[in-house]
Amino acid sequence: MARRNNTFGGGRPPSERPSKICAHCQLPFTWRRKWARDWDEVRYCSERCRAAAKRERP
């Protein structure tokens, strides 16, 4: 089976995967396979942070 050459994290060791800073908790988080299609739009490290940020908006 041929391996895909992904530009993001697929096939890389965790230490080499792209990372971002969470918009709510300000902690770094790394690329995950479930975010492969929309990595550019991912802003929060978890559902908990996403929900907390939504609650804090006026």
Image (cartoon, rainbow, N blue to C red):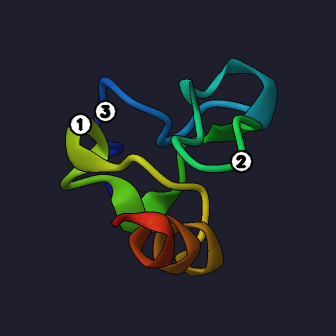
Amino acid carrying mark 1 in the image: Asp
Q: Residues within 10 Å of mark 2 (few under 14, many from 20)?
A: some
The quarter of the image holding the N terminus is bottom left
- Looking at the rendered image, the disc whose residue lies closer to the viewer, 1 or 2, is 2
Say the numbered circle drawn on residue 40.
1
Of the numbered discs 3 and 1, the one sitting upstream in the chain is 3
Front: mark 3 or 1: 1
| Residue name at image x 80 percent, y 24 percent | 15
Q: Give the image location of residue 35, x and y in percent.
A: 37, 59
The residue that mark 3 highlights is 6
Instruction: Where is residue 2? Give x, y as percent.
Output: 30, 47
Nearer the observer, 45 or 26: 26
* In the rendered image, the vertical position of residue 20 relative to residue 27, given as above or below: above
Q: Based on the displayed image, in which of its 4 quarters is residue 17 positioned?
A: top right
Callout 3: helix, strand or loop? loop
Of badges 2 and 3, the one in the foreground is 2
SS at mark 2 in the image: loop
Determine whether label 2 and label 3 are within 8 Å by CB. Answer: no
For marks 1 and 2 on the same chain, the one whose residue lies earlier in the sequence: 2
**Location of residue 20 (image quadrant):** top right
**Disc 2 target residue:** 25
* Residue 18 in which image quadrant: top right
Quarter of the image that includes the C terminus: bottom left
Q: Nearer the viewer, residue 57 or 53?
A: 57
Estimate the x, y position of residue 43 in percent, counting from the top left.
Answer: 40, 47
Q: Amino acid at mark 3?
A: Asn
The answer to whether residue 20 is left or right of residue 2 is right
Is 40 left, or right, of 48 in this rendering? Answer: left
Mark 1 touches mark 2? (CB < 8 Å): no
Q: Identify which residue is drawn at 31% across, 32% down.
A: 6
